[in-house]
Image: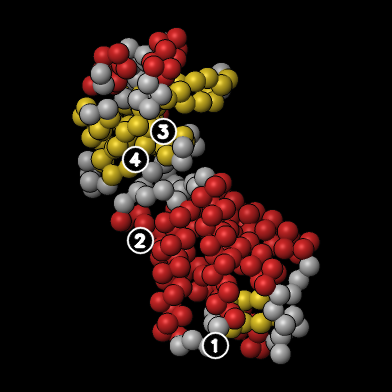
């Protein structure tokens, strides 16, 4: 009979959960804050305690795994609608099934020492350095998959959106750039020009390209106007920003985001014949 050490059990499954969530995020091109990822990984680690229970029916285990995948996605990633939630849950569920199936097959055929598989949960009695190695391999694998997918995706795309911010509604044409990773508080940031910001309240629109006014507005009402750090080829700077919601016109998909205001009036998309856009945003689905 295999002796199970609870601390090793939780630590191992915490790392495995983290690696699978990272893989899911890379496949869906979504990022999670460190705090949310840590909380989800801990939830996954604690869920491994099911190995201590009597054997459960396969149907129950399958349902539990699906519910766990839903909970992990909800904890790790911000809400972007039912479609994206279902997509990410499905990917995580499939990845977890493949991993559990592979480990069960390994245990059945080879029965390696120090390994146990019970109730769909894997346990290895391994030293700390191997746990650290597993975390490194998981991270590098997820990054590699993300880089490979990035090369296969179209680099740029123009999309039309309806935007709501500060109680105002406007229309924007945004350049979706797969190389843009700008986020703030876990949300994507759409950088828009001064002309496109005209639908916002006048005092906020006037802050586009005016750092002193933006800073003053931020001090007066930090819940209304944020200062968003932005890194460009010219260096780092702060842009005034507001919370917003984008609704993509072609399919009605809704994306919570931030609008960052700059003094530029348009952005060019070289792959679309130089068409002008009101702003640019990192890739969203």
Q: What separation in Å lies between label 3 and label 1 (alpha carbons)?
A: 48 Å
Identify the element where label 4 is drawn: strand
Q: In the figure, 109 relative to 250: above or below?
A: below
Disc 2 to disc 4, C-alpha distance: 17 Å
Q: Secondary structure at mark 2?
A: helix
Which residue was labeled with disc 4?
A: 256
Is the residue under label 4 in contact with that under label 1 (CB below 8 Å)?
no
Task: Say if residue 59 shows up in the picture.
Answer: yes
At 32% from the left and 12% from the top, the residue drawn is 206
The crowd level at tag 3 (other Cα within 10 Å; few <14, some 14-19, many 20+) is many
* Disc number lying in front (3 or 1): 1
Label at residue 54: 1
Q: State if disc 4 and disc 3 touch (CB < 8 Å).
A: no
- Mark 1 burial class by Cα count in 10 Å: few <14, some 14-19, many 20+: few
Closer to us: 248 or 156? 248
Q: Which residue is mark 2?
A: 86
The mark lying in front, picked from 1 and 4, is: 1
Q: Earlier in the sequence, mark 1 or mark 4?
A: 1
Q: Residues within 10 Å of mark 4 (few under 14, many from 20)?
A: some
């Amino acid at each position: 009979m295999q002796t199970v050490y609870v601390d090793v059990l939780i630590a191992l499954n915490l790392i495995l959960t983290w690696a699978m969530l990272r893989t899911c995020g890379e496949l869906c091109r979504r990022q999670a804050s460190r705090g949310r990822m840590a909380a989800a990984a801990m939830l996954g680690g604690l869920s491994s305690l099911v190995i201590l229970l009597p054997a459960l029916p396969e149907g129950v285990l399958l349902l539990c795994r699906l519910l766990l995948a839903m909970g992990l996605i909800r904890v790790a990633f911000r809400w972007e609608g039912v479609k994206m939630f279902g997509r990410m849950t499905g990917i995580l569920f499939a990845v977890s099934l493949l991993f559990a199936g592979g480990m069960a097959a390994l245990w059945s055929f080879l029965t390696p020492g120090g390994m146990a598989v019970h109730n769909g949960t894997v346990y290895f009695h391994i030293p700390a350095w191997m746990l650290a190695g597993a975390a490194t391999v998981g991270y590098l694998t997820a990054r590699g998959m993300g880089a490979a997918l990035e090369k296969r995706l179209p680099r740029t795309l123009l999309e039309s959106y309806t935007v709501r911010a500060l109680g105002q509604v406007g229309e924007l044409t945004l350049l979706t750039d797969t190389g843009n990773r700008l986020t703030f508080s876990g949300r994507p940031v759409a950088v828009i020009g001064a002309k496109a910001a005209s639908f916002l309240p006048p005092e906020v629109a006037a802050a586009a390209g005016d750092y002193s006014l933006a800073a003053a507005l931020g001090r007066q009402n930090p819940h209304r106007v944020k200062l968003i750090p932005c890194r460009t080829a010219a260096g780092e700077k702060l842009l005034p920003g507001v919370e917003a919601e984008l609704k993509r016109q072609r399919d009605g998909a809704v994306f919570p985001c931030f609008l960052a205001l700059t003094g530029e009036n348009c952005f060019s998309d070289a792959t679309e014949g130089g068409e002008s856009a009101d702003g640019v945003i990192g890739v969203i689905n």
